[in-house]
Image (cartoon, rainbow, N blue to C red):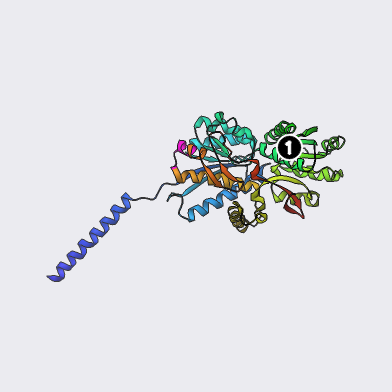
């Protein structure tokens, strides 16, 4: 009899345990993923921007998920390659909005592709955090309500270049700019800010992104009273400008590049010809040169060491853009969840975020959150970056 009772009690216990387990499994399910859309120029003419951006974003997403996700929600990163093409970028943006239903998008890589979709973001009321530099991406703010960006603005770059020129007594400058959206925006700022720094533009040369020789432009500048040259472009023409400048023996006219030059691959491609070239860059490029007490030192070195270990290649400004944009998106998701409007409002009021390109302080009147002081003037020395004097 006792044995029979024991069997009954064991059966009842097993039944209750199973029922409770089934009830728990039915009522408690894993948190839904938080989606982040990304558009990068992974291939095509701007792949030197998009490839490190994609790698960086994937690395960060992997780290976040290994650590338990965002408040328990896995991070689902959905990346599309626009190949540096505005039409393909537009298609990718609409796919992220309508098919993938993401609450926030990071990228694109270039100013041209970013400008091609800012109106899409505003119309769809979805936060866009661009990885490109033109001020027009976020200005005027009243027409860019849903759009932000993380690279230093071309305004700040022009100012930083002219600041350095003033310390060297340079007052006459020849400029040469690409006809891309990035180059056109840079040219506009160089022309606008020159008189405010007591600088005269004595030559204003332009060229296409596929040009293979810039000797004519540089020769014209050489024939003027210019005391320095500013080149503003992305891609192969940056390297071409350096090589042609050196071949023409123009070392007596310092060559300043825009922040588009911010990759050690450009130094490698230029070789010894790059020695002495100057450019203002985000401090992500010079983590090892920063003093130990610098506010950005830890985040820059953590990223530098993790990226170089994972991919066996040096970091660049461009991967740093993906780091900054994704971190902004993640901070918003942590704070307010996946509601688009709440994400937008959170980003607009986000301050004190230490990133790869500076300390971000967004506001309703500033959707970039950086200043010229977040840029460091560097020069190529011994085949690497050095802080310029």
Q: Is residue 63 magenta?
A: no
Residue 62 pos. (x, y %): 52, 53
Residue 212 seen in this snapshot: no
Looking at the image, residue 234 lies above or below residue 120: below
Q: Residue at x 27, y 58 (%)?
A: 18
Magenta region: which residues? 336-344
Q: Residue at x 75, y 41 (%)?
A: 237
The residue that label 1 is drawn on is 209
Assess whether residue 338 is covered by the magenta stretch. Answer: yes
Q: Main secondary structure of the magenta part?
A: helix
| Residue 370 image offset from top left, x and y in percent | 60, 41
How many numbered circles does the render carry?
1
Relative to residue 14, is residue 175 depicted above or below? above
In the displayed image of the protein, which residue is found farthest to the left?
1
Q: Is residue 14 visible?
A: yes
Query: Where in the figure is residue 343, as x and y percent of width and height?
Result: 48, 39
Residue placed most toward the observer, 352 or 25: 352
Mark 1: give few (<14), some (14-19) or many (20+) Cα within 10 Å: some
290 sits to left or right of 230: left
Q: In front here: 203 or 18?
A: 203
On screen, 103 above or below 4?
above
62 lies above or below 166: below
Residue at point 68%, 36% (across, down): 182
Q: What is the x, y in percent for residue 260? A: 69, 42
Q: Quadrant of residue 132?
A: top right
Disc 1 secondary structure class: loop
């Amino acid at each position: 009899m006792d044995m029979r009772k024991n069997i009954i009690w064991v059966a009842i216990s097993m039944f209750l345990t199973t029922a409770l387990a089934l009830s728990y499994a039915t009522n408690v399910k894993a948190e839904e993923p938080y989606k982040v859309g990304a558009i990068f120029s992974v291939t095509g003419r701007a792949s030197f921007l998009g490839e490190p951006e994609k790698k960086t974003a994937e690395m960060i997403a992997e780290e976040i998920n290994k650590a338990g996700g965002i408040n328990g929600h896995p991070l689902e990163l959905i990346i599309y390659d626009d190949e540096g093409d505005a039409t393909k970028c537009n298609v990718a943006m609409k796919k992220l909005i309508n098919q993938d239903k993401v609450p926030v998008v990071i990228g694109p890589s270039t100013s041209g592709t970013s400008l091609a979709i800012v109106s899409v973001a505003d119309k769809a009321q979805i936060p866009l955090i661009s990885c490109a530099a033109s001020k027009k991406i976020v200005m005027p703010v009243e027409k860019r309500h849903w759009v932000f960006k993380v690279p230093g603005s071309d305004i700040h770059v022009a100012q930083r270049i002219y600041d350095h020129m003033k310390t060297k007594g340079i007052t006459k400058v020849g400029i040469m700019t690409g006809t891309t959206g990035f180059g056109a925006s840079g040219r506009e700022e160089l022309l606008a800010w020159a008189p405010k720094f007591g600088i005269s533009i004595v030559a204003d040369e332009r060229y296409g992104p596929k040009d293979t020789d810039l000797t004519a432009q540089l020769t014209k500048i050489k024939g003027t009273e210019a005391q320095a040259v500013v080149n503003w472009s992305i891609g192969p023409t940056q390297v071409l400008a350096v090589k042609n400048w050196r071949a023409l023996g123009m070392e007596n006219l310092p060559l300043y590049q825009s922040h588009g030059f911010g990759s050690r691959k450009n130094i490698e491609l230029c070789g010894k010809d790059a020695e002495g070239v100057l450019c203002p860059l985000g401090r992500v490029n010079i983590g090892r040169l920063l003093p130990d007490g610098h506010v950005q030192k830890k985040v820059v070195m953590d990223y530098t060491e993790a990226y170089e270990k994972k991919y066996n290649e040096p970091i660049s400004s461009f991967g740093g853009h993906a780091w900054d944009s994704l971190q902004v998106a993640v901070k918003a998701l942590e704070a307010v969840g996946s509601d688009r409007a709440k994400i937008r409002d959170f980003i607009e009021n986000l301050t004190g975020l230490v990133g790869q390109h500076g300390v971000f302080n967004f506001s309703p009147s500033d959707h970039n959150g950086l200043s010229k002081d977040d840029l460091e003037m560097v020069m190529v020395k011994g085949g690497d970056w050095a802080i310029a004097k």
